[in-house]
Image (cartoon, rainbow, N blue to C red):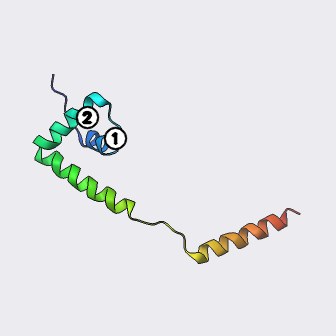
Amino acid sequence: MEQKITEEDVLLYIYNELPSGRKSLVEQAIASSPELFKFFSESLITLKNLNSIQDDPDHTVISILNEESRSSSMETY
């Protein structure tokens, strides 16, 4: 019986979370299916873009949180 390869399988392949026996099936499916190849390519681009995002809080936010933290700790005494 032929196993259907899904987009979820492709994502698991990208993140290297597939069982080793399924990896070659997914590679074959990506190579032979234009739809899965497109999804694979777009997913790699999205992953690259997500990895380039820096999530640093603004200095103002850090200052406010530090002030709140100090005032809360002083209230307990």
Other-residue count near label 1 (Cα within 10 Å), few / some / many at <14 / 14–19 / ≥20: few
Instruction: Say which element carries label 2.
Output: helix
Q: Which mark is residue 49?
A: none
Nearest to the observer: residue 42 or residue 24: 24
Query: Could you tell me if residue 5 is visible in this image?
Result: no
On the picture, is 47 further left or further right than 75? left
Residue at point 16%, 48% (across, down) = 37
Question: Residue 44, how many percent across, how many down?
Answer: 27, 54
Q: Residue 18's x, y, as percent? A: 32, 35
User: Which structural element holds mark 1?
Assistant: loop
Q: Residue at x 60, y 77 (%)?
A: 60
Decide: few, some or many residues near mark 2? Use Cα within 10 Å; few <14, some 14-19, many ≥20: some
Instruction: Tell me where residue 49 appears, x and y as whole percent.
Output: 33, 62
Q: Answer left or right for 8 relative to 32.
A: right
Pinpoint residue 32: horizontal percent, then vertical percent: 10, 41
Q: Kindly tell me whether residue 58 is visible in this rendering.
A: yes
In the picture shown, does residue 6 fall above or below 42?
above
Q: Where is mark 2, residue-wise?
A: 23
Mark number displayed over residue 16: 1
Q: Specify whether 16 is left or right of 39.
A: right
Rendered position, 45 above or below 71? above
Q: Residue at x 32, y 31 (%)?
A: 19
Quadrant where the image shows the C terminus: bottom right
Query: For the residue marked with disc 2, what is the amino acid?
Result: Lys
| Residue 69 position (above or below residue 46) | below
Q: How many marks?
A: 2
Q: State how far apart marks 2 and 1 are (Cα).
A: 9 Å
Decide which of 61, 27 is in the foreground and name it. Answer: 27
In the displayed image of the protein, which residue is found farthest to the top?
1
Label 1 amino acid?
Asn
Residue 13 falls in image quadrant: top left
Q: Say whether disc 2 or disc 1 marks the residue closer to the N-terminus.
A: 1
